[in-house]
Each structure stands twice: as structure tokens, then as C-alpha cells.
Amino acid sequence: MQNNTPSQKKYYSPTQMAWRRFRHHSLAWYSLTFLLILSIVILIAPFILEKIFRFDYTITNIYMRFLPISLAHPFGTDDLGRDVLARILYGGRISLSVALISSLSSLLIGTAIGAWAGYYGGIIDSFLMRLTDAVLSLPTLPLMILLAAVDLQKALPESLSFLMHGNYASMIKLMIIMIFFSWMGVARLVRGEFLSLREREFVIAARGLGVSNKKIIWVHIIPNCVAPIIVSITLSIGGIILSEAALSFLGLGIQPPIPSWGNMLTNAQDYIRSSPLLAFFPGLFILLTVVAINFVGDGLRDAFDPQFVNKA
């Protein structure tokens, strides 16, 4: 006996549809896989080297300088006899940490400023957007170089000066600089979303029910802005990695003995002719990571774009 009941069409939630579209974006999918593998290796490998093999990436050995690629040293050794692969892994942890922390911090700042400007409008909107435009108009790289040369330990009050002590002071200063120059794009994006959403029926209904403005902003409107915010912040991570590498290359970013991909390039520039691999490997990891992040950002943008719904 045949079953003539027509098969039911399968429906997907917006999140499921976005995930299906992202999976169909081959470059984005492979890039995400690469980034996940790289992140796992960067997180686990240094721990294994330090805790299990008692390996210290800061130990120097002048008798092992510029060793070629081998099983013992897959990427060779540098001018002080340190293993390049180990420094790449530790440096990747620093570079990615700076990018992620700076991106998330700028996300929070930009979302708050854009939400207030877009929801309240009027004088608040004008002031916050003029502030945003003023920061956007600043010459980014020259000002980054200028701020990186400033001794923040003297500029901070005594209660906060402890933050700028120790080996990680340069890392904290670099993150502050990155956050200062990264929140504007998110603020303008969120403001635009709020201008289009604040007069929608669900917002008007929430106001009619006596819901506070704070709850309307963070509970009712912000969740509807998540998709473009995720895309924007993903694309900004690659730019922050490049900025960190540029400042570290100029000697104004992460300072030794802490390795980063940028300051590894700085150390390698004196030996670019005799040992080009010292510059090749950190440069390669910067290139692959930034390209992969940009591909993931493009894939997320296509996945969340409504015009791609019918292609899933």
C-alpha cells in the first residue's frame, strides 16, 4: 500500500539557515577549520613543552645559533639559539590574545555608544557621533606610534600604575591603544541598526507595557543586532593582528623577552640575508591567520545576509 501523503517541507530557524549558508562557503569553512586547529595547537603545545618536557623558550644557547630545519628543531633556531617553532607558538598566543581581548573590549564600548546614540537620538546622538567622527579622522598609524612611545606608567594614577610593571606592561599598553582605535566602526554600525529598529512594533509594544529603556536596549534591540556586530568584529580581528605586528616590528609593541609574531620579524630583519627563514615563518603565520579570519568574516557576512536565504 502506497503512502500518498505529501512529504512535509523541512523548515529551519534563522540560526540554522545561517549555519547552512556558512557551511556552503568553502573558503570560510576551511579557514574556520584552520583557525580552530591553530588555536588548539597554540593553547596546548606551549603547556606540553613547559609542563611535560620542562622546556623554556627563553633559554639561549650561543652554540646552537642559526641551526637549520631538523627533527629536533622543525623551524630551526634563531640568533640566540632559541627554537623558532616554540617561539612561534608562544608568540601566536600573545598575538591572538591581544587581538581577541582588544576586539571584545572595542565591541562592548562600540555597542554601548552606538546603542545610546541610536536609541535616544537628539543631543546624545549628535555628541557621541561627533566624538566618533573625531576619532575616525585621526591618522591612525602615526598616532599609534606616538602613543606606543608614551610611558603610561607615569600617566596613570598610582593606584593603577602596578598594571604597567613587569614583562606584560607592553602588552597591556598595546591593547589599550588597539581598543582606542577599534570601537568606532562598531558604534556606527550599531547606531544604524538602532535607528531602524527603535520604531519597530515590538519596541513600541515594550514601551507601552512600561518596560524600561535600559531593558529595551539590551534585551529587545541588541539581540536583533547580533549578526552584523559579529561580522564586523570578526573582520576587525585581522586588522588588529596586523597593527600589533606593525608596532612590534617598529619596536613599539610587545617587548622582549615575550615573543610575538611582530617582534620576531623585528629580530629577524638583521639576518634577512643570512637566515631568511627567521622572517619567513612568523610572516607566514601572520599572513595565513589574517587571510583566514577575513575569509571567515566574509562567510559570516554572506550567511547572515537575507539575500542568500534562497541559496541555502
Image (tube, grey):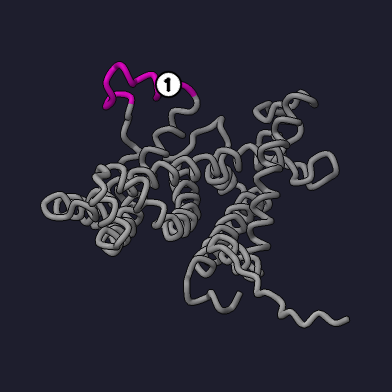
Which quarter of the rendering shows the N terminus? bottom right
Q: Position of residue 255 (x, y in %)?
A: 49, 34
The answer to whether residue 160 is magenta is yes
Q: Which residues are magenta?
A: 153-166
Q: Residue at x 56, y 58 (%)?
A: 293
Q: Nearer the viewer, residue 182 or 214?
A: 214
213 to the left or right of 85: left
The image quarter containing residue 108 is: top left
Observer-nearest of 142 and 208: 208
Picture residue at 71% right of the left edge, 30% below the top:
47
Q: Going 68% across and 26% down the picture, which residue do you hit?
A: 59
| Three-letter amino acid code at the position of disc 1 | His
List the single residue furthest toward the left.
123
In this figure, which residue is indicated by the disc labeled 1?
165
Q: Position of residue 32 (x, y in %)?
A: 64, 57
- The answer to whether one can see residue 300 in this image is yes
Q: Residue furthest right?
A: 1
**73 relative to 124, above or below:** above
